[in-house]
Image (cartoon, rainbow, N blue to C red):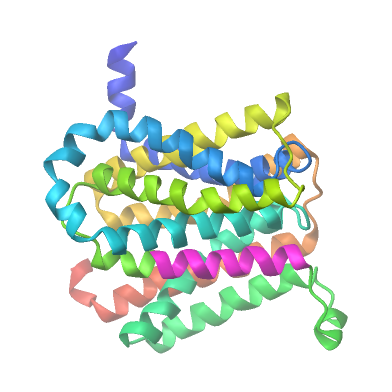
Amino acid sequence: MFLRLKLIFNNPYILLLICTACWGGNAVAARFAVGEVSPLLLTFLRWVGVSIIICIIAYPTIVRNASLLKARWVYLFCMGALGFTGFNVLFYFSAYYTTAINIGIFQGALPVFVLLGTFLLYREPISLVQLGGIILTIIGVIIVAIRGDINQLRTFTFNIGDLLILLACLIYSIYTIFLRQKPDVPGMAMFGVISVAAMLASFPFAVFELVAGSIIWPSDKGALVILFVIIFPSFMSQLFFIKGVQLIGASRAGVFINMVPIFASVFSVILIGETFESYHMIGLIFVLTGIAIAERMGKNIRNPKQNE
């Protein structure tokens, strides 16, 4: 048994598929959480649980790198508050208004948001091929956002949940872009400290929810959702992604993120009973095609020697 587990943990493709399945499952968990545990409390409890687990496991690594981490504490706190707390708050609120399928498809557009962000913030050049991929992805997102109904563009009426998840993805893309400025410490140490930062940053939100009288204490179903998001989309997925990057590199591992909307759609249909509409299929095709063009073909054109 242990040999099989070792073989799995050394297989990057299995690890990355499990990782993206966990992330896809987070969209379904967000929908299951509606009415079972309030979104701000869920965000806080998620990062409390993750902080405890990761700090126990990575404590020696964190201690060894304490001086580097302390020197960048402002950066680390902002990253946790933005990428983990900010993203999760909007993510879980969006589930009150939109489907898990929509959430998953919009998440799939993240690589293109990152590409646009690096151009705007760092002036990294974008080729015409990449621009074409970006346009295709944006078209796919719009198709899903308007439910395939062009009249919604004329009246400019959008589902608030779709707008919230789009804003969440924009925030997470900013977090991803600024990861290039991270201190030179092991991934687990970085993840542990940022998780604690997210826990601290999300605490005032949970208090506000309590004071406002809108808090929903976890039901039995809500408690299961909390356990799921702590173990799978948070801890296990990060552990597997870090290992996957170590085994095959960041660029190849990043391609697997494109599986998130596919897993989210499949899980949503099977577990929640959501309907996968024709506009979902069209939008998903546009998003995945756009990402493939922007990420892979764009890189090949800029770096033709890589494939020689």
Expressed as whole percent of the image width and height from the top left, the position of residue 209 reads 68, 50
Taken as a whole, is the magenta stretch helix, strand or loop? helix
- Residue pushed farthest front? 211
Viewer-side residue, 95 vs 115 = 95
State the image quarter where residue 16 is shown. top left
At 69% from the left edge and 32% from the top edge, which residue is drawn? 218
- Residue pushed farthest top? 1
Expressed as whole percent of the image width and height from the top left, the position of residue 279 reads 77, 65
Q: Quadrant of the C terminus?
A: bottom left
Compared to 19, does 87 lie above or below?
below
Q: Quadrant of the N terminus?
A: top left
Expressed as whole percent of the image width and height from the top left, the position of residue 263 reads 59, 45
Q: Is residue 265 visible?
A: no
At 45% from the left edge and 58% from the top edge, which residue is drawn? 81
Expressed as whole percent of the image width and height from the top left, the position of residue 213 reads 77, 47
Q: In the displayed structure, does residue 286 sit left or right of residue 298?
A: right
Q: In the displayed structure, does residue 245 sit left or right of residue 277?
A: left
Q: In the displayed structure, does residue 255 sit left or right of residue 221?
A: left
At 64% from the left edge and 27% from the top edge, which residue is drawn? 224
Report the magenta residues as a range.
160-175
| Magenta-drawn stretch contains 169 | yes
State the image quarter where residue 156 is shown. bottom right
Q: Is residue 71 visible?
A: yes
Q: In the displayed structure, does residue 226 sit left or right of residue 210?
A: left
State the image quarter where residue 137 is shown. bottom right
Compared to 161, does 134 lie above or below?
below
| Magenta-drawn stretch contains 163 | yes
